[in-house]
Amino acid sequence: MKRNNNGFTLVEMMLVLAIIGILMAVSAPGIMTWIRMAQYRGVAQEVDSALRETRSRAITNNRQHRIVFFVGDGRQRFRVEGSNGGIWTTLRQWEVPATVRLTGNLTPLVFNPNGSAGADTVNICDVNDSVKVRVILASSGRVRIDSP
């Protein structure tokens, strides 16, 4: 009688599943750290994008524009505002995830019609205020993202 060997035994399948489980257990902390850092970088890119947009609007409209940060009531937000004769109008707004905190000066960052602004740094932190990513604004209006 001829025996058919076209498959896996239960023992072989269980061994493969055990190896996959061990590999997942070993890699899970690294993956979680990577996911959290991706979230911090994502918020930094949103702040960077908002700063660039604000500068562009100031130059295009030949009027001051600013970014205002709001921290309170358990939420953090920032928004782009445009000046029209001394009256500030909200043009766009972002909400920051609860697991991320913005720290730094956080006073309104004003862009002049020539694109210049006051130099400042916005820190993207975890809930323990440990700085993960920085968004740096130069007085020339240049914006860059930096790791601490």
Image (tube, helix red, strand yellow):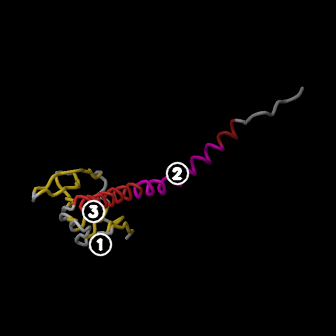
Amino acid bearing label 1: Ala
* Residue at left offset 41%, top offset 56%: 38
The foreground one among 49 and 8 is 49
**Magenta stretch: includes residue 64:** no
Looking at the image, is mark 3 or mark 1 earlier in the sequence? 3
Amino acid bearing label 3: Arg
Residue 54 image-quadrant placement: bottom left
Q: Which residues are magenta?
A: 15-37
The foreground one among 115 and 94 is 115
Name, please, the residue furthest toward the left: 86
Please provide percent x and percent y for residue 14: 64, 40
Residue marked by disc 2? 25
Q: Secondary structure at mark 1?
A: loop
Q: Secondary structure at mark 2?
A: helix
Q: CA distance from mark 3 to mark 2?
A: 46 Å
Q: Secondary structure at mark 3?
A: helix
Q: Overall secondary structure of the magenta stretch?
A: helix
Categorize mark 2 by other alpha carbons within 10 Å: few (<14), some (14-19), many (20+).
few
Nearer to us of marks 3 and 1 is 3
Q: Along the horizontal axis of the image, is 53 left or right of 106?
A: right
Residue marked by disc 1? 138
Q: CA distance from mark 3 to mark 1?
A: 12 Å
The image's mark for residue 55 is 3
Please provide percent x and percent y for residue 37: 41, 58
Q: CA distance from mark 2 to mark 1?
A: 44 Å
Name, please, the residue furthest toward the top: 1
Nearer to us of marks 3 and 2 is 3
Amino acid bearing label 2: Ala
